Amino acid sequence: MIKVKRLRHVTFTSPNIEAQLDYYQSIIGLGVIQRSDGRVLLGTESDELTLVLERGVDSHLTSLA
């Protein structure tokens, strides 16, 4: 079995990216690194990528790195 030491980043889909973005910015404290149509990259103050939000039909985890 692989022993995970840390997560690099995760990707979530959501039909309401703006609500998710508000949560991760105001509650978790992440900042927007890059934004394009239907996709937002969030990270720490040192610009380390931690979360990708993508517009989708339903909310779910799509990938772990």
Image (cartoon, helix red, strand yellow):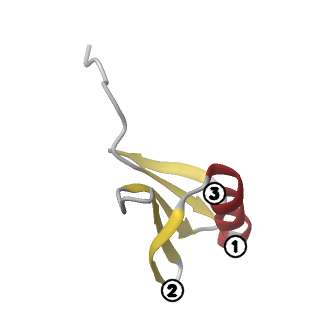
At 63% across and 62% down in the image, what residue appears? 25
Residue wearing tag 1: 18
Seen in the picture, residue 17 relative to 5 is either above or below; the reply is: below
Residue 4: x, y in percent? Answer: 31, 24
Q: What residue do we see at 35% from left, 57% from top?
A: 48
**Crowding near the residue tagged with mark 3, few <14, some 14–19, many ≥20 C-alpha atoms within 10 Å:** some
Cα distance, mark 2 to mark 3? 18 Å
Check residue 37 in the rendering and tell me which mark sits there, or answer none: 2
Q: Count residues near mark 2 (Cα–Cα under 10 Å), then give few for <14, some for 14-19, many for 20+.
A: few
Left or right: residue 7 versus residue 55 is left
Tally the marks.
Answer: 3
**Secondary structure at numbered mark 2:** loop
Residue type at the position of mark 2: Asp
Instruction: Give the quarter of the figure containing the N terminus.
Output: top left
19 displayed left or right of 6: right
Mark 2 in CB contact with mark 3 (< 8 angstroms): no
Mark 1, other Cα within 10 Å: few <14 / some 14–19 / many ≥20: few
**Quadrant location, the C terminus:** top left
Q: Most extreme residue toward the left, as rendered?
A: 2
Q: Amino acid at mark 1?
A: Glu
Q: Which mark is residue 24?
A: 3
In front: label 2 or label 3: 3
Q: Earlier in the sequence, mark 1 or mark 2?
A: 1
Q: Is residue 7 above or below residue 44?
A: above
Q: Secondary structure at mark 3?
A: helix
Q: CA distance from mark 1 to mark 3?
A: 10 Å
Q: Quadrant of residue 55?
A: bottom right
Which of disc 3 and disc 2 is earlier in sequence?
3
The type of residue carrying mark 3 is Tyr
